[in-house]
Image: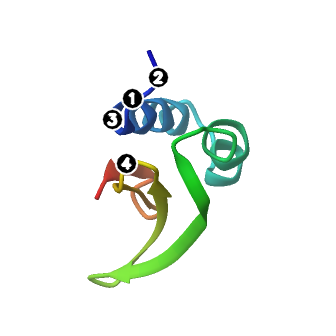
Amino acid sequence: MPDTASDLMRKCNAAAQGGADFPTIWNTLLKPHPLVIGRPRQALLNGRTRLEISLMTGQVLVFDSSASHYSIG
């Protein structure tokens, strides 16, 4: 069964908790993943920088760089 957006988010958070930085997670988990569309976009929300990664599902995987945390937006 293919990964869902939530599965992908959990894998990214586990890798981040294990010490992986965004470039590592991007190159190893996200970039080759079939759900991921295109490249990350930088956005600013409430004064916090975040990266938004579009998914085939229409959802967005969000990386909050100040918290080193991934969520579905």
Question: What's the residue at 55%, 32% (across, down)?
Answer: 15
Q: Earlier in the sequence, mark 4 or mark 1?
A: 1
Instruction: Give the Cα distance between marks 2 and 3.
Output: 11 Å
Q: What is the quadrant of the N terminus in the image?
A: top left
Instruction: Give the Cα distance between marks 4 and 3.
Output: 11 Å
Q: Label 3 crowding class (10 Å Cα cut-off): few <14, some 14-19, many 20+? A: few
What type is the residue that disc 4 sits on? Answer: Thr
What type is the residue that disc 2 sits on? Answer: Pro
Q: Label 1 crowding class (10 Å Cα cut-off): few <14, some 14-19, many 20+? A: few
Q: Earlier in the sequence, mark 4 or mark 3?
A: 3
Q: Mark 1: which secondary structure?
A: helix
What type is the residue that disc 3 sits on? Answer: Ser
Residue 9 higher or lower than 26, as above or below: above
Considering depth in this image, is 4 or 26 the residue closer to the camera? 4
Instruction: Give the Cα distance between marks 1 and 3.
Output: 4 Å
Question: What's the residue at 44%, 79% (across, down)?
Answer: 43
Nearest-to-viewer mark from 2 and 1: 2
Q: Which mark is residue 57?
A: 4
Residue at which label 2 appears: 2
- Horizontally, is 61 left or right of 37 in the view? left
Q: Earlier in the sequence, mark 2 or mark 1?
A: 2
Q: How many numbered discs sit on the rendered protein?
A: 4
